[in-house]
Image: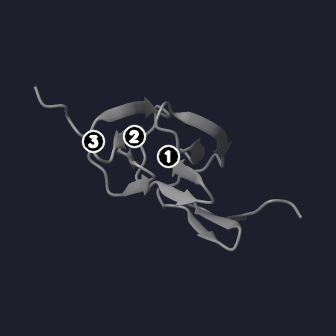
């Protein structure tokens, strides 16, 4: 029986792996060469309409409730490095520029960066 593949708008390739987020909020890691599913992990109960992003060696995923998950690209397991909540509905993908992260919710546009 053929394994079902996730449907997604965007795929991220890091090393020998493809990382995917599907609409129900499940992240997948698939071997680029063999197509084998290495892991899949539901990040939250809420769905996501945004695209997974890759910046500064990390994967960023946000869901419709306004929570952003930061993942370490890792073929052996889903490693969540951080979970950040804006507590506002969000459907847009994150944008990255010069060390800043831009997040658009229904009500606001946030610019996030490390303290200097």
Q: Which numbered tag is attached to residue 103?
A: none
What is the crowding at mark 3: few (fewer than 14 residues within 10 Å), some, or many (at least 20)? Answer: some
Q: How far apart are marks 2 and 3 (CA)?
A: 10 Å
**For the residue labelled by badge 3, is the local secondary structure a helix, a strand or a loop?**
loop
Residue matched to label 1: 63
Of callouts 1 and 2, the N-terminal one: 2
**The N terminus is located in which quarter?**
top left
Farthest left residue in view: 1
- Element under disc 2: strand
Judging by the rendered image, the residue that carries numbered circle 2 is 29
Looking at the image, residue 50 sits to the left or right of residue 10; the answer is right
Q: Can residue 78 be seen in this view?
A: yes
Which residue is painted at 57% across and 48% down in the image? Answer: 66
Q: Distance between the residues labelled 1 and 2?
A: 18 Å
- Check the image and report above or below for 115 versus 62: below
The spot of residue 80 in percent (x, y) is 60, 36
Q: In which quarter of the image is residue 13?
A: bottom left
Which of the two discs, 2 and 3, labels the residue nearer the N terminus? 3
Binning the other alpha carbons within 10 Å of mark 1 as few (below 14), some (14 to 19) or many (20 upward) gives many
Distance Cα–Cα, label 1 vs label 3 = 17 Å
């Amino acid at each position: 029986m053929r394994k079902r593949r996730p449907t997604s708008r965007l795929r991220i390739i890091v090393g020998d792996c493809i990382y995917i987020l599907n609409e129900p909020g499940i992240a997948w890691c698939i071997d680029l060469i063999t197509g084998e599913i290495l892991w899949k992990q539901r990040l939250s109960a809420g769905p996501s309409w945004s695209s997974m992003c890759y910046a500064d060696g990390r994967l960023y995923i946000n869901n419709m409730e306004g929570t952003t998950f930061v993942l370490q690209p890792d073929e052996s397991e889903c490693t969540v490095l951080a979970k950040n909540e804006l507590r506002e509905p969000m459907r847009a993908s994150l944008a990255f520029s010069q060390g800043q992260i831009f997040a658009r919710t229904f009500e606001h546009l946030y610019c996030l960066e490390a303290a200097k």
